[in-house]
Image (tube, rainbow, N blue to C red):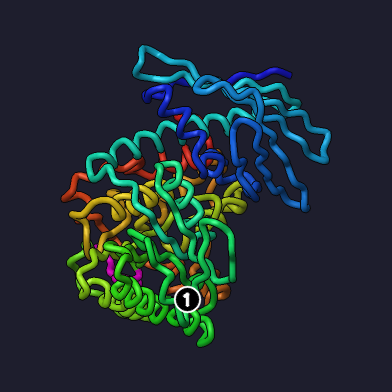
């Protein structure tokens, strides 16, 4: 069966093709709702092989051929399944200012399954190229960036975006490695040469917050953030040919679990509770870097939206089955951020010398839980009529965990980014979810 998907991207032909040739492109184009993991990227579009992993231990090998830059390349899929897949990527100039991107497929995969995927891919390509172009207003530099936590949801998206933007990324990992592009990072005792030749550190690592707030879990949350950050900040400050910028993850948990309808900006006082205490200590741990003259940015992240992880990954199966509903009375504020807007904010933090200190990484328009619930249900075209009693999260997370995570009520505003006239891909929730699930716009 032959199928074709085509759209026009408002970027020059060479720029579009070059983007596809850079590391990270296949990760940026893989829809987040698919149960697919990129094991390895192809070294070349000429004759390389990309390997994808599916549930059940199944591997797909996509071999490239038909290389004709900047107009064409082909990938042919091999898998231990009765699946046929030959994908011809075509690129054609449109008036010297835009590019027609066409995907020609010979496959036995039904078209209704593919339409969502290619709708997502074409939107993602255009939006990423737009974001890279906007970044030229901040800086045209292509720094070498060291990233901790590169295998997490945010780290995976960010490192792929940075490499397609032309940056060199060095992943700081906890296991010994000789792989190019990786360095062994011991959080308890980082090597003195770890940050040699690095321009920017992006520190994302930390134990997951979700779970019952037992003493052991709370200790892991704090211990994986505060002291490792302090040691890394000290090392950054002490490395002669090391970084000039230190970008560290943070969280809107800084403001406390329930601030009602109070509008919270970067100048607002910290709240109370466990997470507020941890985040306050976490941000303070970056001071060795700022005191040494490095530009430090603390990215206070809201509720990240991606079917690949976090809250949305948990809600997706339930809402898809028509079992979703508001939590409690549904009036609590949810300060959210699209995963790709978050990568853009980190990208800006890396490049824009005017950005420093705490930055609220949230969308301009927070929503109440009731609105969030209805918007997600509408996007997935399912009902949302079964409210979740407040007791439910307390059974799963315990009283403290439920208050700090599930029932958190924070109306956070991105005042610093607004002052800089930052451009968002998604200022409102509906378009974000529509894109993340590859849905058609209504």
The answer to whether 271 is drawn above or below residue 157 in the figure is below
Inspect the magenta stretch and tell me whether residue 421 lies in it: no
Which image quarter holds the C terminus? top left
In this picture, residue 428 sits left or right of residue 25: left
Task: Write the residue at 17% across / 66% down.
Answer: 267
Residue 2 lies left or right of residue 376; in this view the side is right
Looking at the image, which is closer to me, 159 or 197? 197
Horizontal side of residue 307 vs 8, given as left or right? right
Up/down of 388 relative to 375, above or below: below
- Helix, strand or loop at mark 1: helix
Residue 170 % position (x, y) = 46, 58
CA neighbours of label 1 inside 10 A, class few (<14), some (14 to 19), many (20+): many
**Quick one: quadrant of the N terminus?**
top right
The image quarter in which residue 129 lies: top left
Residue beneath the point at 42% across and 67% down:
407
Image spot of residue 128 (x, y percent)? 41, 38
Left or right of 337? Residue 439 is right
- From where the camera sits, is residue 58 visible? yes
Judging by the rendered image, the residue that carries numbered circle 1 is 401
137, 31: nearer the viewer: 137
Compared with 327, 365 (above or below) is above
Name the residue furthest top: 95
Q: Position of residue 146 (x, y in %)?
A: 42, 61
Q: Residue at x 34, y 39 (%)?
A: 131
Of 354 and 235, nearer the camera is 235
Question: Where is residue 417 shown, x and y percent of the image?
Answer: 23, 52
Span shown in magenta:
253-261
Residue at the image point whose x is 50% and y is 33% from the top: 20
């Amino acid at each position: 069966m032959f199928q074709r998907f085509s759209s026009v991207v408002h970027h020059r032909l060479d720029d579009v093709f070059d983007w596809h040739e850079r590391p990270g492109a296949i990760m940026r184009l893989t829809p987040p709702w698919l149960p697919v993991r990129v094991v390895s990227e192809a070294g070349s579009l000429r004759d390389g092989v990309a390997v994808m992993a599916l549930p059940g231990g199944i591997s797909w090998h996509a071999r490239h051929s038909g290389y004709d830059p900047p107009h064409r390349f082909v990938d042919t899929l091999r898998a231990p399944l009765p699946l046929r897949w030959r994908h011809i990527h075509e690129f054609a100039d449109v008036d010297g200012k835009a590019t027609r991107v066409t995907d020609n497929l010979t496959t036995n995969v039904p078209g209704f399954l593919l339409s969502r995927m290619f709708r997502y891919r074409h939107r993602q390509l255009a939006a990423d190229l737009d974001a890279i172009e906007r970044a030229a207003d901040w800086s045209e530099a292509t720094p070498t960036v060291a990233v901790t936590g590169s295998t997490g949801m945010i780290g995976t998206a960010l490192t792929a975006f940075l490499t397609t933007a032309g940056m060199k990324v060095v992943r700081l990992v906890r296991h010994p490695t000789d792989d190019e592009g990786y360095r062994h990072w011991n959080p308890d005792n980082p090597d003195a040469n770890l940050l040699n030749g690095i321009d920017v550190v992006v520190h994302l690592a930390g134990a997951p917050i979700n779970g019952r707030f037992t003493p052991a879990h709370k200790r892991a949350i704090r211990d994986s953030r505060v002291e490792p950050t302090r040691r890394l900040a000290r090392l950054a400050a002490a490395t002669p040919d090391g970084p000039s910028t230190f970008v560290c993850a943070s969280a809107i948990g800084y403001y406390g679990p329930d601030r009602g309808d109070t509008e919270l900006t970067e100048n607002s006082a910290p709240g109370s509770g466990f997470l507020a205490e941890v985040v306050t200590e976490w941000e303070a741990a970056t001071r060795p870097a700022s005191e040494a003259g490095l530009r430090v940015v603390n990215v206070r992240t809201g509720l990240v939206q991606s079917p690949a992880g976090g809250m949305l990954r948990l809600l997706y199966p339930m809402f898809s089955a028509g079992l979703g509903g508001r939590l409690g009375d549904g009036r609590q504020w949810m300060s959210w951020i699209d995963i790709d807007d978050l990568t853009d904010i980190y990208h800006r933090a890396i490049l824009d010398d005017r950005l420093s200190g705490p930055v609220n990484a949230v969308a301009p328009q927070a929503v109440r839980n009731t609105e969030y619930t209805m918007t997600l249900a509408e996007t997935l075209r399912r009902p949302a009529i079964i409210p979740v009693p407040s007791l439910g999260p307390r059974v799963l997370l315990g009283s403290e965990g439920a208050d700090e995570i599930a029932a958190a009520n924070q109306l956070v505003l991105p005042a610093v980014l607004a002052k800089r006239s930052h451009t968002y891909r998604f200022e409102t929730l509906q378009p974000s979810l529509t894109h993340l699930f590859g849905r058609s716009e209504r």
